[in-house]
Image: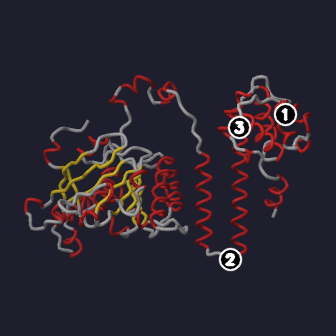
Amino acid sequence: MQISETALEKGLPSNLDAERFVLGAVMMDDTYFIQLASGLDADDFSIEKHRRIFQRMLDLNQRGERIDRVTVANELMKHNLLEACDGLSYLVSLDDGLPQVFNIESYIRIVNDKAVLRRIIFTSQKLINRCLIGEEEPDQILAGAEETLLKLGETRVKDALASPRQIIEQFEGGINAFLDPSKRIRGVGTGFVKFDEMTAGLHAGELCILAARPSMGKTALALNIAQHVATDPRDPKTVAVFSLEMSSESLLTRMICAGARVDQQKFRAGYLNQEERRRLQMATMQLVEAPLFIDDTPGVTLMDVHAKLRRVEAEHGLGLVVIDYLQLMSSRGRSENRTQEVSALSRGLKLLAKELKVPFLVLSQLSRAPETRPGDHVPQLSDLRESGSIEQDADLVAFIYREEVYKPDREDLKGLAHLIVAKQRNGPTGRMNLVFLKEFTKFENRTNDLGDPEE
C-alpha cells in the first residue's frame, strides 16, 4: 500500500519545464520546429494547453507561415483557445529560464521519455481493468498486452538520419578500417564454404529464411549451422534454438549423432561398436561445453521469444537465433486469417532481429506448388507458404532442394543436395551443391569445395 500511495502522490510522469522550453525555443527561432515535430506529437505533452499550443504551431507550419508569439496567439484566438491557454502572457513566459545556449534535443528526449512512461501506465491500467472485469479469456488479454507493448517499443525507435562522416566515424577503426575489406565485420560463419563466400555469413539484425518442402532436411541444415556456430573452436558464439516441432531430446540426439557421424537408427536400436561409442562421447562432451540453448515450448509467441532471448543475452551474450519453424508460431491474438498472422510474425521477427542485433535463421514451410509444377520441382519465392510478406521482410531467402526425393531410383542423385539463395538483399543469388548424409541427418561441403583454405 505504501508504494501505491507514494505513486499516487507523485502523479503521472511529466516535466513541465522541458515542455515549456521546447515550445519557447520554437517561439524564439521557428527553424527548430521541424526538429520538434519530428521528435514529438501533440499527445506527448502532459497538459492540455501545451498540446493546443503545439497543434497551432503545426497549423502555421503547414501553411508555411512564421511561428512566433504573435502568430501563435492569433491562431489560438481564431479557435477561441487563447484564454484557455492562459493568454498572451503565458506564451511570453514559455522561454523564462531557457538557457542562452539551449539543447533542444535533450528537452525533446525528456518530454518523449515522460510520454512513454505515461502510455505504459495507461496501458497497464487498461489491462488491470480488463483483468478485474473478467469478461475476456486470459489469452485475449495477453494478446492485447503483447500487441500494445510491441507497438510502444516500435514508436520508441526513432533513429536520426546519419551523414557519411557520422557513419564512418561510428565504424570501429575509422576510415582506414572502413576501406579495408579484411577489417570489415563479417557475418556469423555457417561452416558451408560456398554459402559463406556468397553471403559473407549470417549478419547481425538480418532475418534469414531457410525454406523447403517436408523431408528435404531444413531442420538438419539449421542444426548443422547452429552446431558449427556454437562449437567453432576459433570463435564459439551463443546460439538459441526454438524448436516448435521436435523435443529438445530429439534435437540433441540429432546433433550428437551428426557430430559423431553415427547412424541415428543404430543409435536408437543400441547396435553400436566401440569406435562409435567413443565418437558419441566426444561429440556429447563438445556440445555439453558449447554455449547452446534449446527451447521446445510448443506454440511459442513473439513475446515469449523476446523475453527468453533477453535473458540469454544478459547472461551469455547472443550470436545466432534459430526458429523451427515459422508457421508453428502463435501470435496469441485473433487474426482475420492465417496469412495476416504469419505476416505479423515475420515482421515481428525482423524487428526483433534488428533490436537484438543478431541474425535470425527462421525455417519456413513451402506450399505444394513445387510438387504440382510441370518440369522440375525446384522451389521459387512464390512458393513460400501462407504469406508473401515473408519474402518482403527477409534479408535472405534460401531453399533446400534434393532431387533424389522425387527420383529415388536414380543412383547418381543419392546424397546430392542444392542450397539455393533465391534472395539476398545485400549480395548475389545463386545455387551451390552440398552433400547430404541421410543416415547422419547431416549436410557437408563437397570435397572439392574445401580445396581453398578459409581466410
Label 3 Cα neighbours within 10 Å, binned few <14 / some 14-19 / many ≥20: many
Q: Tell whether 384 sits left or right of 420.
A: right
Which amino acid type is shown beneath numbered disc 2?
Answer: Glu
Position of the N terminus, as image quadrant, is bottom right
Q: Which mark is residue 108?
A: 3
Q: Which mark is residue 94?
A: 1
- Determine the secondary structure under disc 2: loop
58, above or below 299, in the image = above
Alpha-carbon span between mark 2 and mark 3: 40 Å
Label 2 Cα neighbours within 10 Å, binned few <14 / some 14-19 / many ≥20: few
Residue 93 placement (x, y as % from top left): 88, 32
Which amino acid type is shown beneath numbered disc 1?
Answer: Leu
- Determine the secondary structure under disc 1: loop
Q: Are marks 3 and 1 in contact (CB under 8 Å)?
A: no
Label 1 Cα neighbours within 10 Å, binned few <14 / some 14-19 / many ≥20: many
Query: Residue 209 falls in which quadrant of the image?
Result: bottom left
Q: Can residue 238 be seen from the camera position used here?
A: no
Residue 128 placement (x, y as % from top left): 71, 67
Which mark is first along the chain, 3 or 2? 3
Residue that carries the numbered disc 2 in the rendered image: 135
- Determine the secondary structure under disc 3: helix
Query: Residue 259 falls in which quadrant of the image?
Result: bottom left
Residue in the foreground of this view, choosing between 434 and 230? 434
Q: Can residue 81 be seen from the camera position used here?
A: yes
